[in-house]
Amino acid sequence: MLSRFMSGSLRNLEREYSCTVRLLDDTEYTCTIQRDAKGQYLFDLICHHLNLLEKDYFGIRYVDPDKQRHWLEFTKSIAKQMKSQPPFTMCLRVKFYPPEPAALKEEITRYLVFLQIKRDLYHGRLLCKTSDAAMLAAHILQAEIGDYDPGKHPEGYSSKFQFFPKHSEKLERRIADLHKTELIGQTPETSERNFLQKAQMLETYGVDPHPCKDVSGNPAFLAFTPFGFVVLQGNKRVHFLKWNEVTKLKFEGRTFHIYANQREDEKIILTYFAPTPEACKHLWKCGVENQAFYKLEKSSQVRTVSSSNLFFKGSRFRYSGRVAKEVMEQSAKIKREPPEIHRAGLVPSRSCPSITHGPRLSSVPRTRRRAVHISIMEGLESLRDSAHSTPVRSVSHGEFLPRSRSHAADHSGDRTAVISDEAYSPSDSVLPTPVAEHGAELSGSRQINGAPCSIEEEKESEAGTPMRGEGGDFAADSRVGQQQQHAGEGDSALSEVEQVNKFVLSVLRLLLVTIGLLFVLLLLLIILTESDLDVAFLRDIRQTPEFEQFHSEYFCPLRRWFACKLRWVGGLLINK
């Protein structure tokens, strides 16, 4: 009896596993779910825990053992999607950024989006002018610590908080001045709403960058926003395509293609190369989901999308969920008492320091910190300086990607933008997207104040590896340039080999499909001519004059010829 009870308990344990989800305020939600539970079940548990109704903007993200990011698919089993063994660890993140976050119906939804954008600001994914950066940081201060109090907030109190990857003393003073004078009396809800209104006007709002390379081997970042598809390269935005202009997204191996119609008579195809086939597939699926969410009018218009033009080749994927218009219509029908919000302003963060907790993490003295900024008066350069042969559409009001100028922060006015390095190199310390060769590409743009700008740098900081001194960076940069040149030549040769292999595989697939179709036709012909099936449509076909002529003049002689040959072969075998 006891052994039967123990065996039953073990079977129940095998059917269940533990799952931990890290929320946007860096608290953790742990639950036990059945092994066959689907992603929707876990997502519903989290939304119930948060008392969240406007949940379509959010998703659950996880990382596989190969360090590749994925969004959890709600229609599939969790255990089948995870390539690791339980217990599983995931993160709740904003998957589809609201086009107008300040206009969201419920305060709890606005608060969660506020936490996500604050995280984007810290990790350098949200770029802006110095004046906008100061106002955003001041709104964060007001939302989390309230009104300025001389007794609680001594001189220089804003320097203890880390809002961006980098900023200067002058910007810190500007943040404190705004917090002291212009935001007095604002409640956390009001400050968060004003923060969202300011953030949604920035050109990198909603950017979740995917590292890639263009056809010339130059690094680039691809992103999908509420307004369209964006390509960030070097220190400028080289492409922006609205969702109604994007006609198709396709991938093969590491190659990602974007088809678009910018005008009635102008069609363009953009091609980029992801670090791995898995990263390319993740990029493609993100693009398919974003296009369906923001472009379509109804979820009934969603169709299964194939990554290839041929039905027997490539991956197939279908977005499951409501589209943006349906989500906003459903949100307008919400009628309930606003749920209580437990703001986590005093909870330390794992991925980025809470602005109300502890001093700024610096690895070098203040005198050696660089303030990185750019002039916003410089317009976006056209693509004539790029290796692309495809047309460019520049819709920016100013160049928002950075150029580094050392030790110039205290001498620059408000006509500067902050929060980045020499090239757009965002990172997410919780869930990074791996880039195979990005360590060498970004080694010349290391940040000095402790905020990681790449995955390799995060590993160094965790292991306690000291960073290179400034004197050694210049020589390293020259070596990196040579390595990049050789790597670009190798990538071009590799891409040619891959194209040949893809062509050969396509021909083989086509040949196999053709042989299969001929075999099916042969079986159907035998059934029509030799079987005794008394089916109406077969009887009608057999009685047609064309079929009778085919049967007597072609099929019967061919059958007799095959029978004669088979008897001849059989006779040879018997005589031997």
Image: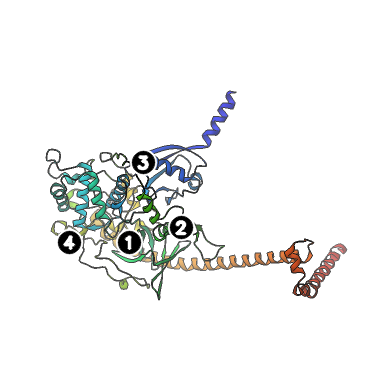
**Disc 1 residue type?**
Val
Please say whether residue 4 is visible from this viewpoint. yes
Q: Describe residue 152's horizontal placement relative to residue 209 as left or right.
A: left
Q: Describe residue 407's horizontal placement relative to residue 25 as left or right.
A: left
Look at the image and tell me in which quarter the C terminus lies: bottom right
Which residue was labeled with disc 2? 281
Q: In which quarter of the view is residue 284 placed? A: bottom left
Q: Describe residue 574's horizontal placement relative to residue 263 as left or right.
A: right
Q: Describe residue 267's horizontal placement relative to residue 149 as left or right.
A: right
Mark 4 closeness class: few <14, some 14–19, many ≥20 residues within 10 Å: few
Which residue is drawn at the image coordinates 46% and 43% (left, top)? 41
Cα separation, mark 3 vs mark 1, equals 50 Å
Cα separation, mark 2 vs mark 4, equals 40 Å
Q: Nearer the viewer, mark 1 or mark 2?
A: 2
Q: Nearer the viewer, mark 3 or mark 4?
A: 3
In the image, 299 versus 309, the foreground residue is: 299
Which residue was labeled with disc 4? 415
At mark 4, the secondary structure is loop
Mark 1 closeness class: few <14, some 14–19, many ≥20 residues within 10 Å: some
Look at the image and tell me in which quarter the N terminus lies: top right
Q: Are marks 3 and 4 in contact (CB under 8 Å)?
A: no
Which residue was labeled with disc 3? 51
Residue 21 location in percent, x, y? 39, 42
At mark 1, the secondary structure is helix
At mark 3, the secondary structure is loop
Q: Are marks 3 and 1 in contact (CB under 8 Å)?
A: no
Q: Nearer the viewer, mark 3 or mark 1?
A: 3
